Amino acid sequence: MANRRVKLYRKNRAEETSHTGIHRAVVLMAYIYLALPMIIFLLGWCRLLIGIPIAGICVWSLVLCYRGRENYIELAWRLSPAEKWKIAVIAVVVFAWVALSGVGGYAWQNTDHATRNSMFRILVDYEWPPAAETRGFVYYVGSWLPAALIGKLGDLDMAYAALFVWVLLGILLIYALVCIWRRKIVLWPLLILIFFSGLDIIGSHIFTEEMISVWGKEHLEWWAAEFPYKLQYTSNTAQLYWVFNQAIPVWLVMMLLFLDEVPGNMIWVSAMLAITSTLPLIGLVPIMIYYMYRRFAWYTPESVGQGWKMVARGMGSFQNLAGGGTVLIVSFLYLMGNDSFTLVSVASADRVSSRAANPAVWLPWLLLLIAFAAAVLVGTLIIWAAKWGKGYIIRNVLYVVAALVLINLFFKYLGGDRTSGNDVYRLAYTAVFLFIEAGIYLCLLFRDVEDKGLFHVVAVSLIAIPFITIGSSNDFCMRASIPGLFVVMLWCIDALGKRRLNLRIIVLMICLVIGAVSPMHEIKRALVNSYEDYTMEYIEEERIFNAANFAGSLETFFWRFMARKTGAGV
């Protein structure tokens, strides 16, 4: 009888300890991680009459997102000794990975850090929002704001320590969601996260004359980034070591979407990327739209009006419309002040005598009006498709878009310009790039991916991105591709996790090993240079405020009507 009671007690305890608490806690921390930079921006950079209400809306939206999220995965709270050891190993490996990135200055830093160090020091030393004379600091600064706030309360060293902890926490949250997705604490997917990359060593061998070693310290991913092609799909380790501020937030959002985020939360969650990962957010939009459609409870509406009510109940939540909408508007008006985004130069804006006639003031509102009109038009078309085709028409939109892209490329590159030969070579060069960086993985993974709709969205996005250029650099290609490449990495983990050994899986493993050479080079370069004498580099603060990529005129709408009025400078 006593043994029976003990068994019954153990059974009840096992049932009690297997619940969704771990997943809920990680999701809540992820929401806070994403929202905190935006809340700090609203309270620290905007006028209080604007910042406080919108920050309040943002916080309440976070609460509603947490309450409204469904489909949590059940996991046991109690951990075995082996699982505790796995957690310790994961923490040590992630710590070493982040430390070698140069974040915080605890190891050698790649060249991009010199500019980022100066921007971070400006955020710590200057009054918010930072300005110098007629120029304001305009950049996707979100990832630095929590650490910069701590630096304002202490000093620059404390700020760098806080930045390191912030990046470390982001990576741990991402991998916690990976383990939740796998429904157990696992070590091997961490290797995929660190070493996932395209086959850059093959591209370097084909298109460059340099001798490349397997365990070298070159930056292999520049093999296709030289003028005029400007192509690069960046490995996870290179993203962390060069642009951690953009990569980590969008990786976290991608994991939330991948793990059954509900349509009523998706716009708010994605909007948190506006001032942390602006270009990756553009690449995330097609994936978010697909997930919103895929997970929405569609029915055939009797009218367009009824269709709008259907959409409003499922997608038009408070957190999406009020939370995500206001955040996107504020972020848009702020980022439009950057010279690279503003269509009117600072010089031409200064020449305009009348403020009412200043394009820098009314242009953002005109673009917002156009974007709103486009959203209404697209929404009406979706409802029309749902009414007449029960939603099936929408599923073919991606194929139509893909066909239009191919037709456009055919006429542009093989039509009128084919006599020059240059564009034909560029098309062939881009095709090789796409196959080496992503296409071979997509071919090997097609059978194993269950969500074929998402596969088509990611494939079309990764094919189209190299043909889009914003400005004179290749930043769009490098950064807008981050969400799609991250999904491809997750599919690799899923395919290997099924433990089915066939020719495709063997070839996939070989490709992953070859691709791992690029992250190995990043790590080797960081290790070698960290053993030598190194210093944290900075550039002149004047260059930051005068650069088109990092600043803009104080005559733009945000700085004149929304920014806090503070003294310029330190």
Image (cartoon, rainbow, N blue to C red):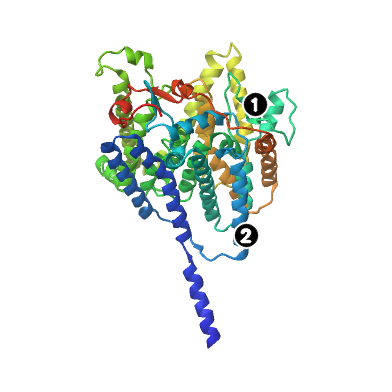
- For image coordinates 51% across by 71% down, the residue present is 14
Could you tell whether 455 is left or right of 566 in the image?
A: right
Question: Where's residue 315, x and y in %?
Answer: 34, 45
Q: Which of the image's four quarters has the C terminus?
A: top left
**Callout 2: few (<14), some (14-19), or many (20+) C-alpha neighbours within 10 Å?**
few
- For image coordinates 30% across by 44% down, the residue present is 57
Q: Is residue 227 or residue 33 the one in the foreground?
A: 33
Q: Is residue 279 or residue 45 the one in the foreground?
A: 45
Question: Where's residue 279, x and y in %?
Answer: 47, 32
Could you tell whether 97 is left or right of 550 in the image?
A: right
Q: Which mark is residue 85?
A: 2
User: SS of the residue at dot 1?
Assistant: helix
User: To which residue does mark 1 refer?
Assistant: 223
**Residue 315 visible to an observer of this rendering:** no
Q: What is the total number of numbered labels drawn onto the structure image?
A: 2
CB atoms at circles 1 and 2 under 8 Å apart?
A: no
Label 1 and label 2: CA atoms lie apart by 40 Å
Could you tell whether 278 is left or right of 422 in the image?
A: left
Position of 535 relative to 414 (above/below): below
**Residue 301 visible to an observer of this rendering:** yes
Q: Is residue 18 or residue 136 the one in the foreground?
A: 136
Nearer the viewer's eye, disc 1 or disc 2? 2
Mark 1: which amino acid? Trp
Mark 2: which amino acid? Trp
